[in-house]
Amino acid sequence: MRRFYRHRWLAISSLLLLGLTFGMPLTAPLFANAFPELARPMYRQDSFATLVLAHLSIVLLSGVVTVLGGVAAGIFVTRPAGRPFRSSLETVLAISQSFPPVAVLAVAVPLIGFGETPALIALVMYGVLPVAQGAIAGLSSIPPSILEIARGIGMDRWQILRRVELPLAAPVILAGVRTSVVINIGTAAIASTVGAKTLGLPIIVGLSGFNTAYVIQGALLVALLAIVADQLFDLLSQRWTPPADASLRSGERA
C-alpha cells in the first residue's frame, strides 16, 4: 500500500492512458453533449491504440538515435583530444534546437519526401541537446581522485569509461534523456503534418476542420503519454544506484 501511494501518480496516469487508449469511443456521448454542434464528435479514422503505438514507435526510434549520438558527443568532448571542440559542439547543438521542428520539416520534406524520415530528423535535432548536456555534465563532474584510483589498480581508459565513468555519470545522463523524451513526445505530434501516423492526426484534422473534440482527444493522450514517461523516468532515477567498483569508493575514502 505504501509503495502504491508513493507511485500513485504513475499508477493513476497509466490507468487513464490505458483506459482512454482503448476506451475513447465509449466517451462519444460525453463529447456529443459537450459539442452538440459537431456532426462527428469522435475521431474514428484510426483507432487510438494504433495511434499511440505509432507515436511511441517514432519517439523510441528518435530517442535511440538521440541517446547514442548525445552520449557519444559527450564522451568525445570530455576526452583530452575532444576538449577543444566542447564549446563548438555546445554552440552547434544549441543552434540545432533553436530551429522550430516545423521549419526543419519544411526544409526536409522537399529533399526527402513525406513520411517518418523528416519527422525523425526534426526530433533528433530537437532532442539531442539535453542528452549531450547531461553526458557532458555527468562525465565532467566525476572526482579526479576516482579516476586516479582506477588507473592505479590497472584499468585502461576503456575500462575506466565503461566501469567507472559511465555508471557514475548515468544519473545525470538519465536526467537529460528524460527531458529529451518528454519534449519529443509532445513534439512528435507535428510529424503528422508530413504524413507520419502519430497522435497528432486527430489534432491536425480537428484544427483543419474546426473540430475541437478531435483536438482534445489527441492532446489528452499526448499529455498522458508524456506524464507516464516522466513518471517512469522518475521511478528509474530513484532506483538507480551507480554500479561503480566498490574498491574505487573505498580507495577514495582511504
Image: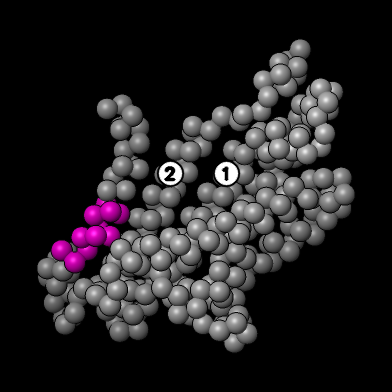
Is residue 141 in view from this perspective? no
Q: Looking at the image, tell me whether mark 1 or mark 2 is earlier in sequence order.
A: 1
Give the labeled residue for mark 1.
174
Give the labeled residue for mark 2.
232
Q: Which residue sits at x=82%, y=45%?
A: 79
**Regarding mark 2 in the picture, which secondary structure is present there?**
helix
- Residue 238 lies, in percent from the top left, at 49, 33
Left or right: 191 in relation to 127: left
Amino acid of disc 2: Leu
**Regarding mark 1 in the picture, which secondary structure is present there?**
helix
Magenta part of the chain: 16-26
Amino acid of disc 1: Leu
Left or right: 41 in relation to 87: left
Q: Considering only vertical position in the picture, is 137 above or below 208?
A: above
Left or right: 108 in relation to 14: right
Instruction: Based on the picture, tell me whether residue 22 belongs to the magenta stretch.
Output: yes
Image quadrant occupied by the C terminus: top right
Q: Which of the 4 quarters of the picture holds residue 123?
A: bottom right
Mark 1 to mark 2 CA distance (whole Å)? 11 Å
Q: Are marks 1 and 2 in contact (CB under 8 Å)?
A: no
